[in-house]
Amino acid sequence: MFGKPHKTNQYRRKGRNLIAINKIKPEQWHISDTEVKEALKAKGYDIKQIKKIHCLKHQVCISYWDAKGNICSSFFSYRIFARWQQEAEKLIYAYQTLKEWAKLNYVMKYEFAYYHYPSEMEDALYAILENQLYVL
């Protein structure tokens, strides 16, 4: 009669990323076509022109024409944008006590474990976190 209850991923903590804890609010960004083109080209997409950018809370929907003239649309993480790295860096530098840094470090470890970051961005943010620890 009744099946087993749906099993959620027991290792994934809900509400523990930078967006969910309201430290970064990318849905309020006004992302330009240039920013989108740069981010998508870095990911290997061949973009001719951006058609539409729709910012949601946790991701951005981008419609574009590819080099072949096809209309494409997909959802992308905000973490592909250079602005994400800039906002995360500001956040790291804003924390001035060891206790605040420890909380942020906990969230950043989760971010790196569960979300795809470009390797250069992950390395840079990790280095800044370490440097801020030494400063504190």
Image: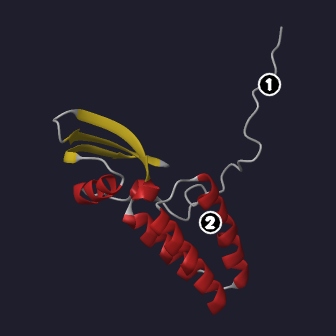
Q: Position of residue 87 (x, y in %)?
A: 46, 70
Query: Which residue appears farthest toward the bottom when viewing the image?
Result: 135
Q: Which residue is mark 2?
A: 108
Three-letter code, disc 1: Pro
* 129 in relation to 18, above or below: below
Q: Position of residue 96 (x, y in %)?
A: 62, 86
User: In the drawing, does residue 46 fall left or right of residue 127?
Assistant: left
- At horizontal 33% and vertical 50% (from top left) the residue drawn is 44
* 21 in relation to 65, above or below: below
Q: Position of residue 83 (x, y in %)?
A: 39, 66
Quadrant of the drawing holding the N terminus:
top right
Q: Quadrant of residue 95?
A: bottom right
Q: Which residue is mark 1?
A: 5
Question: Under tag 1, what secondary structure?
Answer: loop
Pick whichever of labels 1 and 2 is earlier in the sequence: 1
- How crowded is the residue under tag 2: few (<14 C-alpha within 10 Å), some, or many (20+)? many
Query: Which residue appears farthest toward the top when viewing the image?
Result: 1
Q: How many marks?
A: 2
Question: Under tag 2, what secondary structure?
Answer: helix
* 93 in relation to 25, above or below: below
- At horizontal 62% and vertical 52% (from top left) the residue drawn is 114
Viewer can see residue 136: no
Q: Disc 1 versus disc 2: distance between alpha carbons?
A: 31 Å
Colour scheme employed for the rendering of this structure: secondary structure
- At horizontal 56% and vertical 53% (from top left) the residue drawn is 115
Viewer can see residue 130: yes
Task: Looking at the picture, tell me which residue is in the foreground, 98 or 67.
Answer: 67
Three-letter code, disc 2: Met
Quadrant of the drawing holding the C terminus:
bottom right
Q: Quadrant of residue 34?
A: bottom left
User: In the drawing, does residue 119 fall left or right of residue 64?
Assistant: right
User: In the drawing, does residue 41 fall left or right of residue 94?
Assistant: left
